[in-house]
Image (spheres, rainbow, N blue to C red):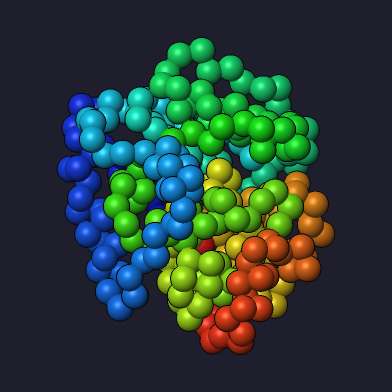
Amino acid sequence: MRSFPAPAAGRACAASQATIESLRFWFPALPGNPSPKGRGEKCLQSSVLGKMDKTCEMKRTMLDSPLGKLELSGCEQGLHKISFLGQGTPAADAMEVPAPAEVLRGPEPLKQCAAWLNAYFQQPEAIEELPVPALHHPVFQQESFTRQVLWELLKAVKFGEVVSYQQLAALAGNPKAARAVGGAMRSNPVPILIPCHRVVCSSGAMGNYSGGLAVKEWLLVHEGHRVGKPALGRSSRRAGAWLRAVGPTSGSPPAGPN
């Protein structure tokens, strides 16, 4: 999850075009990105990923979590980032979930994100009933393989499920792009909400995580997996169907953090 600098208050998100151009540099050989099929899905994607048609006045708020403090940043148009402020090591009593925090002021996307995260930690069965905040980080504002991968991960891989790099590449339309999927995971600006911790190696090993392996392990255990051994048998049903459809593919998990 590569960290992208948030736009300064009052500056247009379009000023971050260089960030998007850098994504093109890293993925020059990838094929065209498939667009979601169906008007309903397009409307859903548009509502979640937001539009780059207004300036961003950035706001930030802090949220207590079992993994330490999280910083949420965003604007009226959408959420930009979720940042871990700890050292990548959950506290010894991390299973004791703090009381839900209240976000009394700030843009609606930050309030929605805080409510979603509180439910994730306290009452996971409720998250499917909560709105996903609109996303307005530059990586979501223009078609790219990274955006397509993150979108597929958000909508296809649910709480308690895992997916391999290879399966997620297939979901995004390029079964041979397992390594590029690792790059997309490093570019994820909103971890937990877009669950890059659910992307594991085909062997069932956890793989890497920019938030720290201890954090990834905690998140997977929180979702019902055994310590150190995510159960690929509980992989996303849609991902499994895709992989069976495309047959054996090549590709291996990328080196470095995801």
Determine if residue 42 is in view.
yes
> Image point 56% across, 43% down: which residue?
193
Residue 139 percent across, percent down from the top left: 34, 51
> Image point 22% across, 30% down: which residue?
55
Q: Is residue 256 left or right of residue 88?
A: left
Which quarter of the picture shows residue 192? top right
> Image point 47% across, 27% down: which residue?
110
Residue 144 percent across, percent down from the top left: 33, 61
Is residue 36 or residue 169 the one in the foreground?
A: 36
Is residue 103 or residue 66 the one in the foreground?
A: 103
In the rendered image of this protein, does residue 145 appear above or below residue 154?
below
Residue 255 percent across, percent down from the top left: 50, 74
> Image point 45% across, 28% down: which residue?
109
Residue 182 percent across, percent down from the top left: 48, 68
Q: Among all residues in the image, which is located at the extreme top?
A: 104
Which quarter of the picture shows residue 26? bottom left
Determine if residue 229 is in view.
no
Number of numbered discs: 0
In the rendered image of this protein, does residue 128 appear above or below residue 241?
above
Q: Is residue 93 left or right of residue 83?
A: right
Q: Quadrant of the N terminus?
A: bottom left
